Amino acid sequence: MSMTTLEGFGGRVALQVPMKALMVSCALVLAIVGVLTWSLMTGSYPMTSAEVWATLFGDPPSDTASTVVWEFRFPRTLVAFIVGAFLALSGAALQYVTRNPLADPSLVGVSQGAALVVVSVTILAPTMGYFWRPMLAFGGSLTVAAIILAAASSHRGGETLRFILMGIGVAALISSFTQALLTYGDIDRAMSALGWLAGSVHSVGWDEVRWLTATACIVMPALFFAARPLSAIRFGEDVATGLGIRVRVARWGLVILAVSLAATAVAAVGPLGFVGLVAPHLAGRLAHSGVGLHLVLTALTGALMVGLADFAGRAAFAPIQIPAGLVTAIIGVPVFVFLILRTQARSQL
């Protein structure tokens, strides 16, 4: 495997990374920039790429162009990218911690726990400030994750589908409570909650960008710093303990990080299914690498997925807007079925 050395701080810090992984990372960044440009150009007020970048650098061709880019299209696209990276990293962390390739925030009840809390607040306490939504969503997600992990940890066999099956069961139970609130709650509030549950990015603004960025500055460095425990845990509890990892503490810390990323993303735009499932596997197929670089590739892949999904939902049938959550589900369901079939085939060998 061809390697290249990255140096910094006058040579005091040096990292060896696979050349292919580095090239794929650069390609994903360029693709994200391309989707950003394409998204800012497209809409009822069309713009050229030159006009878009002139507006971003403070020289808009008109006041209308400045308003369209800065108040509507740019924050929406940024939120799509950040949310995609959050869900992808959350899925990767859960897959490493559970040693299960099918782990995903939307499949194991984490997203549903956040959704139940947000829908409950929307219908039962509509006057509650928007500031509390991510905190309450985090509490709901963490509660669900604790229940599932406690139930699954009473059995051996990290490679089985037990964690996923328990998660699907708990998710179904939580979804029934959510449906009850939507059915018997105030109709106007229920309609507002239904639009949010579809996983749409069209109503976000700079407030979402700010607290998503704040969360990213706190949680994402901690997750990348945890690359060593993740590398050890994926080989099993005995190996991780032999390498000096406090497995129980590390597992719960990583679960909290994964849940915080998923809960913040869900609180911002609603549940987006299968991003956390597909992105880590796709990143692994694009380039083989260590855990740290794989997390980078996973974040870039998830950002590109949701960015493309939001753009496709906005532009494919304009002026009708299809929620990004529906687009990611259409992509994710076939991948989920394929992964289940592959897992079953491996277990029979």
Image (cartoon, rainbow, N blue to C red):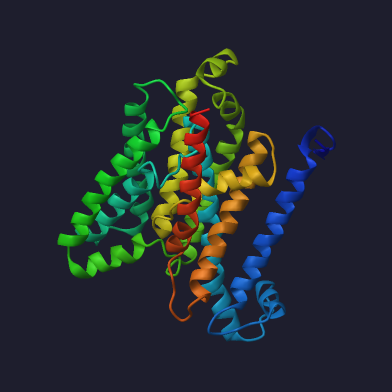
The answer to whether one can see residue 75 in this image is no
Task: Find residue 204 and report its image quarter.
Answer: bottom left
Give me the residue at 50% from left, 46% from top: 338
The answer to whether one can see residue 7 in this image is yes
Q: Locate residue 30 relative to residue 214 in the image: left or right.
A: right
Q: Locate residue 187 relative to residue 217 in the image: left or right.
A: left
Residue 311 location (% of width, % of height): 54, 69
Give me the residue at 65% from left, 44% from top: 285
Residue 227 location (% of width, % of height): 61, 32
- In this rendering, the answer to whether 105 lies above or below 96 is below
Give me the residue at 54% from left, 44% from top: 89
Q: Nearer the viewer, residue 262 or 160?
A: 160
- In this rendering, the answer to whether 60 lies above or below 126 is below
Q: Locate residue 302 relative to residue 323 in the image: left or right.
A: right
Q: Nearer the viewer, residue 253 or 59?
A: 253
Where, quadrant-wise, is the N terminus in this rendering? Answer: top right
Task: Find residue 123 and report its image quarter.
Answer: bottom left
Q: Residue furthest left?
A: 184
- In this rendering, the answer to whether 77 lies above or below 229 is below
Q: Nearer the viewer, residue 315 or 125?
A: 315
Q: How many marks?
A: 0
Give me the residue at 34% from left, 42% from top: 168
Q: Nearer the viewer, residue 229 or 101?
A: 101
Q: Locate residue 151 relative to residue 330 in the image: left or right.
A: left
